[in-house]
Structures are given as C-alpha cells and as structure tokens.
Amino acid sequence: MNRSAIPLRAALLASAIALAACQPATDPAQAEAARIQAAEADADAMADQFEAAFAEKNWAMARAHGDVLLAEHPGSAAADRIRERHQQATADAKQEREDRRLQSLWIYQTQPVDGGEQRSAAIYARDRVDVDGSGERPVRLIFRDHPDWGRSSYLVLETGDFDCYGGCRVQVTVDDAQPRAMAASRPKTDEAIAMFIDDEAALWRIANGAATVAIEFPVKAGGTRTALFEVGGLDSMRMPGWE
C-alpha cells in the first residue's frame, strides 16, 4: 500500500466526521409530521382506488381496496370517508359471490332431436339422499321441453326407486312456507329411475320465484325422503316459453 495515502484517507475521514457534526440534528417533531403526511397521502391514494371501483360497481375490487386501506391506515381521514361504503361494497361482493354460486348449480342443455330441439334445465339437490340403504346418492330435478313429448318436470335417482307407480302425491315446500301436495307418477320404464311431477307449469313457477324448493317423495324401500334444491339461480330465459 502507498504509505502516503494513509494520511490522506485519515484526513478525509476526519473532515467527514467534522462535517456531520456541524449538521443540525433531525427534529423528531418534523420527522413525525413528515411520516404522518406520507401516511395520509398513501391512504388518500388507496381511497381513490376504492372510489373508482365503487363508482364502477366493481364490488369485489372496491372491497379489496377498502380492506387494505382500513387495515393499514385505520385511523386516517380517508378510512373514515370510505368506511360506510366499504361495508356496502363488502355486502354486495358477498351477494355477487352467492348469486354466482346459485347460478352455477343449474345445468342447461339444448340438443337437436327429431322435430326440433330439446331443451332442459337441471339441478342437483343440495344434499345427497339415501333412498334404499345403499348410501347417499345425488337426486336431480329436471325441467324438459321436447318437441314431441311436450313439457315435463321430474326427479331422477341413481339407485333405488320411487313408490309412485300408478300415481302418488309429493309434498313440495317453498322456502319457509307450508308444504303443498302435488300429483306425481312413476312411468313404467327401466330406462331411468324417474318420477314425473305432473303440474310442471306450477312447479316451474315455484322454482322461478323461490330460494329453495324441498320435495318429499315416497320410495320403494319404504317411507319418504326429501330432496332440497337451491333454485334461486334459475335463469328462466334459458327455457324460452316457460316464463
């Protein structure tokens, strides 16, 4: 190492220390004020994002921006401004998720058949049902529109059988209302384990305006079983002419 560089480095270090010593100390009050100002600016920026999403009725995005703002700057003026509307956005976002869930429960099909098209709307019961002691299985409710066979509504089992050959009555409960009896019949066919609910127009009107429909039906194994359908997401436009 060049020995002449050592005194030079020492002199530079001493000068830097002396210069730092001459600088005024940071005022704690000013530092805190700067921190608060920066935090408020950050909160205002988050509030602007919330406001934009809220104006577009993008409830999920508005809720997300509001969540971050309220978590990171809960005592800010910006948080106070959006707090009430954040609650609304949260509720609306939750309702949107529930609406999408209910809509996804329905399965719509259109297929060509002799004479035109067959359309159907089908939904599985919320809970599986044990109809014959072999274990819980899905139960489906189907509305069908066929160019030759006309319109119909029926339940379909995967195992067991209905005790409705020659006709029977099923109990239909809409939401929290009292059950009502509806005529039903089991066709004499082995192609499917199906039971028609004879007044398909009435059942469609019920399903089209309800949140839940419970159908209690007799089974060959003895007694009755109940299938509960969450029908609130039904899109009636998918079955033209049934409205």
Image (tube, helix red, strand yellow):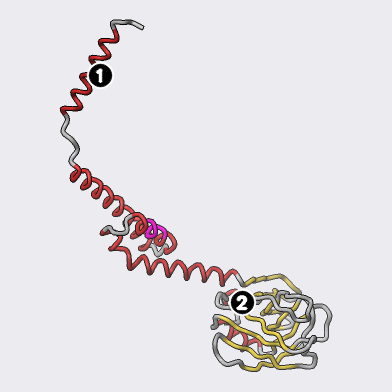
The kind of residue on which mark 2 rests is Met
Using the rendered view, name the quadrant where residue 145 is placed: bottom right
| Residue drawn at x 80%, y 90% as measured from the top left | 165
Given this view, does label 2 or label 1 mark the residue nearer the observer?
1
- 6, above or below 181, in the image: above
Q: Is residue 1 visible?
A: yes
152 relative to 95 in the view: left or right: right
- For disc 1, the neighbor class at 10 Å (few under 14, some 14 to 19, many from 20) is few
Q: Percent position (x, y) of residue 66?
A: 37, 60
Residue that label 1 marks? 13
Q: Overall secondary structure of the magenta stretch?
A: helix
| Residue drawn at x 62%, y 72% as measured from the top left | 106
- 122, above or below 49, in the image: below
Q: Which residues are magenta?
A: 64-68
Q: Percent position (x, y) of residue 121?
A: 65, 75
| Residue drawn at x 45%, y 66% as measured from the top left | 93
- So how many labels did they put on this image? 2
Residue 66 on the magenta segment:
yes
- 212, above or below 85, in the image: below
Residue that label 2 marks? 239
Q: Quadrant of the C terminus?
A: bottom right
From mark 2 to mark 1, how far is it between C-alphas? Answer: 86 Å
Using the rendered view, name the quadrant where residue 76 is placed: bottom left
Q: Is disc 2 placed on a helix, strand or loop?
A: loop
- For disc 2, the neighbor class at 10 Å (few under 14, some 14 to 19, many from 20) is some
The kind of residue on which mark 1 rests is Leu
Q: Is disc 1 placed on a helix, strand or loop?
A: helix
